[in-house]
Amino acid sequence: MVIRDEYNNKYPGIFRLAVKLTYKPALYSWINAILPEKLHLKTTHPELGGVYLLTICDYPNKFEKMLKIYYLEIFKHELYNFQRDDKTWPKNLSWKNFKNFFSYSFASRIVDLELENPIYDDENE
């Protein structure tokens, strides 16, 4: 949902919880093991990683609980970005292994500053 009010008409807010993933060494080790000829990453790159929009959650102490609901789909999506053949994926896609592969941070306020190509708002169409 896009929020619109007097100020947000210019820069609409998005009513979602965002989670930003950052890759950890375990993910780089997996990537290098399965794709040694294409991509060899030795160091971490904090700019790499996905941002996912989750259902809004008003209480910061429940953000991680919300992530736990979606972590498996996020985990699979991230692995798929590197290797489409799921037979090469780690066998253990548990929450514990997710935290071994990724660090994460949350944002509860998302604002679209792109005025030329705003996010589609189906409620006002």
Image: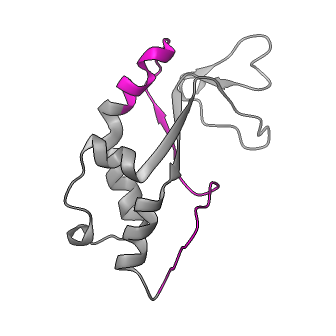
Whether residue 74 is visible here, answered yes or no, is no
| Label total for image | 0
Residue 106 at x, y percent in the picture: 55, 31
Q: Range of the magenta residues? A: 38-67
**In the image, is residue 44 part of the stretch drawn in magenta?**
yes
Residue at the (50%, 16%) spot, across then down: 60
Whether residue 42 is visible here, answered yes or no, is yes
Q: Quadrant of residue 94?
A: top left
3 lies left or right of 87: right
Residue at the (47%, 61%) spot, across then down: 25
Q: Quadrant of the C terminus?
A: top right
**Residue furthest to the bottom:** 37
Residue 53 at x, y percent in the picture: 49, 35
Above or below for 19 versus 75: above
Q: Quadrant of residue 90?
A: bottom left
Residue 15 at x, y percent in the picture: 56, 21
Above or below for 24 versus 105: below
Colour mode of the rendering:
one colour
Residue at the (39%, 32%) spot, across then down: 67
Above or below for 8 versus 105: above
SS assignment for the magenta stretch, majority: loop
